[in-house]
Amino acid sequence: MFSSLHSLSFMAIAFSSLLSPATLPAAEIPGPQAPADLRCEYLADPMGVDVLRPRFFWTAGHPERGQSQTAYQLVVSTQQDADIGDAWDSGKTASGTSIQVVYGGKSLESGRTYYWKVRWWDLDGRESPWSLTAAFDTGLYERADWKGQWIGGKNQLRKEFVLASRPKRARAYICGLGYSELRINGRKAGSNVLDPGWTTYEKRVLYVTHDVTRMLRQGPNAVGVILGNGWFKSRALLFQLAIEMEDGSRVEVVSDPSWKAADGPILEDSIYNGETYDARRDTPGWDGPGFDDREWMPAEVVKGPAGVLSSQMMPAIRVVDTIIPLRMTNPAPGVFVFDMGQNFSGWARLRVEGPAGTDVRLRFAELLYDNGMINQENLRSARAEDHYILKGGGEEAWEPRLTYHGFRYVEVTGFPGTPGLDTLRGRVVHSAVRPTGSFACSKPVLNDLQRIIVWGQKTNLHSVPTDCDQRDERMGWMGDAQGTAEEAMMNFDMAAFYTNFVRDIRDEQDDQGRITDTVPHIWGGRPADPAWGTAYPLLCWYMFKYYGDTRVLEENYDRLKRYVGFLQSKAENGLVKFSSYGDWVAVEKCPGSLVSSFYHYYDVKVLAEVARVLGKVEDAKTYDRLAAGIRAAFHREYFDPKTGSYGSTQTANTLALFLDLAPENARDAAWSRLFDDIVYVHDSHLTTGIIGTKYVMELLTRMGSSDLAYDIATRTTYPSWGYMIANGATTLWELWQKREGPSMNSHNHPMFGSVGAWLYKALAGIEQAESSSGFEKLLLRPQMVRDLRYASGSVKTVRGDVTCAWSRTDRSVRLDAAVPLGVKAEAAIPKFNLKSLTVKEGGKTIWAEGAFVPGVEGVIEVKDASGSIIIKMGSGRYAFELTGK
């Protein structure tokens, strides 16, 4: 991500951007600022909202520190320029919240556009300007709103129609399974690819809404749809185009047997195997009006999936970047291998010129053999190859539509002539979640670690969180999903994505409360291994903690109870012991029964907390009692008084300590066993699998051993993240070790990326108070360990931007912080045994001679505690400097 030089530059920029507002000329200091970053159901100006009472979010700034919102007014209108909310006017509402504000107006209508804006009042009663106007489009709330039929039969479908005038408003609602591309009058609608997202089709199918107003015109028009197999492994289209004319009349174009169908130039499409495109079969104009389709067949009415139609209210899969190859080699006659320099998900765009009928083959791989040829052994049965058959007659450009690959290397054969570096471009494709976090520090290996975590995470978001992006798998494995969720939430805006995935999990749950190892369920068992099934309660809980989302708790509470009830039905002497995977891919295997017992306890504890949040007091007491019984049973079952530990593995003792499953009289012995095993037996290396790894780094920091966690994170010998990096990893591996061959060696597998949350929480120091949700109470406690000289982290939370950036010398520590409006924060600056301490903020003294010096805006209190100076503050930007002798 950054070299040390880049890191220095980054820190300089971070510090200079955190100047105190007090340094601005008075004339430049405005009052309360207009709300910004307006969101509806977590999305900016979303299309197809099918929530009856959507929620609104905004952030706001204020030049004064310590300010907060005391009231807001939110208006929703059916008219873009209306100042009065004809759908809802909240009035001046006394509230400090700017997140999860629930719509409270008239019933929303299907297929309409609504406009909204908001303003707020500060502590002094001053009113902000109105925000810019945002919008949301409602989807089709009822199945009866859909007029079309499921059609198919071929992979290209078209329909012509005539409009008497230009339209005022037009929305296309499309569910094209497995994947589809919508084209209107010869152009692609929108920028989505691989639409719609993958679901359990017999329970739910997603449709996508497009604003196509400007794509239509007076006179003849045409709609074209390309269909692929996708995960549905068949083709079916449900389509509805709703057009409002200037005179108030309405026109609808729906899918029915009047459409025409033909097989186009895509001869084969498969997620695993790739796409074959014969450009000789191109039929220019097929997706525009006036095309001669007399030889096309009428579309067939087909049986569609049984699932509920829901709007795709999450970031769509898109082409998000383009990569230029680093180099091209020629390891054998006619074989050209392109190195993209980065492992990623997507495909290659090809430029070629040659005779008609020439078949150019592109094969994709993560690895090379020693002789320079690509190594596809780890892809197992996935063929992972695309074919482009030239039409001839000049330069041609092509990229696939209906498949994706995971790769770093592309082998080109059959190319007419000799390709150059401009022949191929890598196209990065994944769910286009918004990046919200950044981390950098003075240790290059940790910057590299952040880089491979981010690349591994984002390229395994394909409408569901996948385990890998390259082989014949790419499943929504629940263990991987829960293990990486906090890291993902620090790096990306995952709220809408996980809202959808939690619903996917709920769709898979059966009447007994059982859920599955993969969602949508393809592989794995039912019931899920408890370490995998815990994704359900934990993702719900993380949504509450990171985004303040109580609705996800309300919607899933009864189902979470059902899941915990199922676990209870399998308990033996108070413990759930069945296990399929346990501490997956550990160097030293922890007993699966212990892992399952840990998650049984964890799930019950989470459910008790959820009950408390929802005001279900008696339920909370019930689950607290149940948890206490599991805790006692865990100690009885797994603690060995002879060794003073819960087993011989790092994971066993980590799990016992992380959730305080070890009673007070056993904690010291278990901790000593864990510490000694890591430090003395394994030279500060982990032997944990994905479960133990998720918790051990946070546990070490909590136990006052951040130095040891840092040692682990910066190791470059096996087993370690640094070992992956030292051996050329550009994304995280499936295993700690470097391995080739056909089994268990994915080189893009994010499940060991849980350490990414530790980079933010520990090294950058960005945490929430235990009682906080949605970052309403911040703890800025960076661990300034070993030879680390500086670190910086920023996270765009639902309440606004949070930054903690620090640097240190032998005699000083600087900490710069950004705290969102209305948020209270507590920063801890280590004293490093310095004497005669002075702490200043923006050059003004706030601590001297062992006492707090009041008078600096926003600083509430400063005190000396446990080797650190503790500073309590309100919102704003701060630059603290501690100096001593």
Image (spheres, rainbow, N blue to C red):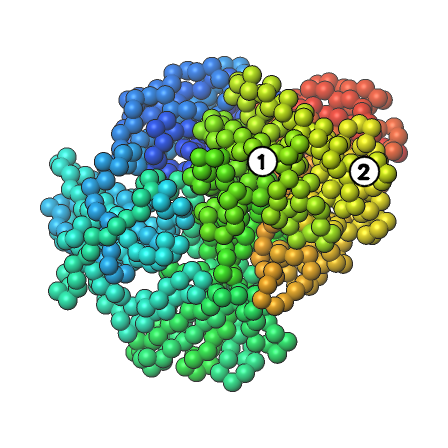
Residue with the most extreme left position: 164
Camera sees residue 806: no
- Disc marking residue 350: none
Residue 192: x and y in percent read 38, 51
Residue 793: x and y in percent read 64, 41
Which comes before the other along the chain, label 1 or label 2? Answer: 1
Left or right: 810 as drawn, with respect to 48? right
From the image, which quarter does the C terminus lie in? top right
The answer to which image quadrant residue 620 occupies is: top right
> Which residue, given by chain and number where applicable, does mark 2 sit on?
640
Camera sees residue 272: yes
Q: How many marks?
A: 2
Q: Dot 1: few (<14), some (14–19), or many (≥20) neighbours within 10 Å?
A: few
Q: What residue type is labelled 2?
A: Asp
Residues at discs 1 and 2 in contact (Cβ within 8 Å) = no
Residue displayed at 56% across by 50% down: 457
Residue 510: x and y in percent read 45, 38
Left or right: 808 as drawn, with respect to 466? right
Mark 1 residue element: loop
> Which residue, given by chain and number where applicable, does mark 1 sit on?
570
